[in-house]
């Protein structure tokens, strides 16, 4: 018997034609395309390498030829001579099943899985069209199913690494019953490892194994309180080091990496000592935490966009519940400065937005905020390409090189000199299929 969520996704899939847009039809298996780029960003060096022609066939980069006007016999030419071509961007922190609004908290009681499924298809397409060919979805039961639909070519969207349900502690940031009244809480009962809520080392192991059973690709924990959860604390630690270690060790059994949502200092320390791959948000990251992260090789995914978005919306009466609003005002405004400090202190930074907090498709604005924080544009682009691939543990994407995936995005002009160009994506290719192209 199919789960309700699976039925919901099937309903969505059945209503959408395969590659509904004229530009999204994949090329024939042996068709060749010659992308004539005015400039190419080398993600390894962080430099532009000048005009080049990229020959793409069978979803891979087959040749990189000097000069934007190289004549490749039999290949379909794509004129990007006024553009900079870059490896497809990766957003390491999204939530494709939702999007923040003043109605978000009540919708959980009014909407069905099918409603979120329909929305996720639109959000995925917007993300891809914005230049993000890969994402890591860090929390949401829709995402593993959406990932499968995209992989099967049933809907358009980025390549997804899906966490499924985030793992929390009782009352923690990802406890699904936060804010429920007593009658509803007693009716449902306390959530446990199956629902992603743990309170012991044994629970921790079971929760990871449940995510494996459900088809997750990565594990996400909420190591501290959060901004948007219906709970008072946004930064208190919510796991012991031993619990984090149990999650990380069990995750390794299945080839999973662990991302840790964390705002508070103590929770970050415990997460790093427990062996997580990345710290997400990191608002109150101290010098001691930065030193610890450098010692352990822990990545930092700042999500500046989300911080700025919630701080801005907290100024609007009624946008957030009263218990959330003070956290949004206090925590959100700090993340951009934390990112600046982390970069200056040599912490490894990768790209992520926490999109779903803000509107999907606006992901590239994070580049602008990173540059505003003092992170050089080449470093910001590396964070969304080669560094993101390192966080994911893959080596077939994130660079424009022979044999790598043909994930390519192009923007007009020189984005290293004018970072605003990231909001003008004209060309998107994923696995050799063109989803967006300049108008003729």
Image (spheres, helix red, strand yellow):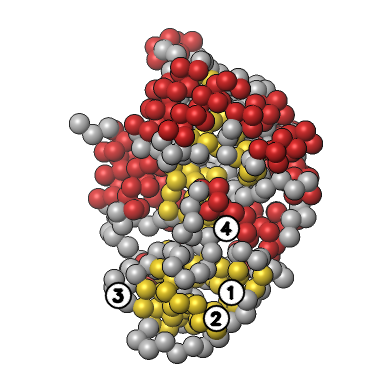
Label whose residue precedes the other's in the sequence (1 or 3): 3
Give the crowd class for mark 1: few <14, some 14-19, many >=20 residues within 10 Å. many
Question: Which one is earlier in the sequence, the residue at label 2 or at label 3?
Answer: 3
Q: In the displayed structure, would residue 200 be above or below residue 296? A: above
Which residue lies most toward the left here?
Answer: 1
Look at discs 4 and 1 and give the one toward the viewer.
Answer: 4
Could you say which quadrant of the image residue 48 lies in? bottom right
**Residue at 67% over, 23% down:** 236
Residue at image mark 2:
52
Q: Specify the quadrant of the image occupied by residue 232.
A: top right
First along the sequence among labels 3 and 4: 3
Q: Earlier in the sequence, mark 4 or mark 1?
A: 1
Q: Position of residue 400 (x, y in %)?
A: 52, 68
Q: Are marks 1 and 2 in contact (CB under 8 Å)?
A: yes
The answer to whether residue 314 is above or below residue 178 is below
Query: Residue 311, position in %: x, y?
Result: 70, 40
The one of 277 and 146 positioned closer to us in this rendering:
277
Residue at 55%, 81% in the rendered image: 52
Cα gap from disc 4 to disc 1, whole angstroms: 14 Å
Counting from the top left corner in percent of width and height, residue 325 is at 67, 30
Q: Which residue is mark 3?
A: 30
């Amino acid at each position: 018997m199919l789960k309700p969520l699976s039925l919901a996704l099937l309903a969505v899939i059945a209503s959408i034609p395969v590659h509904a847009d004229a530009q999204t039809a994949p090329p024939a298996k042996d068709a060749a395309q010659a992308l004539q780029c005015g400039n190419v960003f080398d993600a390894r060096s962080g430099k532009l390498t000048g005009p080049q022609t990229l020959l793409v066939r069978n979803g891979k980069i087959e040749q990189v030829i000097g000069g934007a006007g190289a004549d490749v016999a039999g290949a379909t030419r794509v004129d990007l001579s006024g553009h900079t071509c870059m490896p497809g961007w990766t957003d390491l922190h999204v939530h494709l099943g939702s999007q923040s609004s003043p109605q978000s908290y009540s919708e959980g009681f009014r909407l069905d899985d099918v409603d979120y499924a329909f929305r996720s298809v639109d959000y995925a397409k917007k993300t891809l069209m914005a230049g993000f060919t890969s994402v890591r979805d860090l929390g949401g039961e829709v995402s593993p199913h959406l990932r499968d639909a995209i992989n099967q070519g049933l809907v358009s969207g980025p390549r997804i690494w899906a966490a499924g349900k985030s793992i929390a502690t009782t009352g923690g940031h990802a406890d699904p019953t936060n804010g429920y009244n007593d009658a509803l809480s007693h009716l449902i009962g306390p959530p446990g490892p199956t629902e992603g809520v743990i309170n012991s080392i044994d629970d921790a192991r079971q929760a990871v194994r449940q995510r494996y059973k459900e088809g997750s690709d990565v594990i996400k924990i909420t190591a501290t309180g959060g901004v948007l959860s219906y709970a008072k604390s946004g930064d208190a630690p919510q796991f012991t080091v031993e619990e984090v270690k149990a999650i990380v060790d069990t995750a390794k059994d299945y080839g999973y990496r662990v991302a840790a949502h964390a705002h508070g200092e103590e929770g970050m320390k415990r997460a790093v000592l427990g062996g997580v791959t990345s710290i997400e948000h990191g608002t109150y990251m101290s010098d001691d935490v930065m030193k610890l992260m450098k010692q352990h090789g822990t990545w930092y995914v700042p999500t500046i966009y989300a911080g700025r978005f919630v701080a801005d919306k907290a100024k609007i009466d009624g946008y957030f519940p009263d218990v959330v609003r003070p956290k949004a005002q206090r925590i959100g405004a700090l993340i951009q400065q934390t990112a600046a400090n982390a970069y200056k202190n040599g912490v490894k930074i990768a790209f992520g937005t926490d999109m779903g907090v803000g509107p999907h498709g606006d992901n590239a604005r994070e580049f602008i905020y990173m540059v505003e924080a003092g992170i050089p544009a080449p470093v910001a682009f590396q964070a969304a390409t080669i560094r993101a691939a390192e966080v994911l543990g893959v080596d077939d994407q994130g660079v424009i090189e022979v044999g790598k995936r043909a994930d390519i995005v192009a923007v007009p002009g020189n984005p290293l000199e004018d970072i605003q160009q990231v909001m003008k994506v004209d060309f998107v290719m994923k696995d050799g299929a063109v989803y967006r192209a300049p108008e003729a």
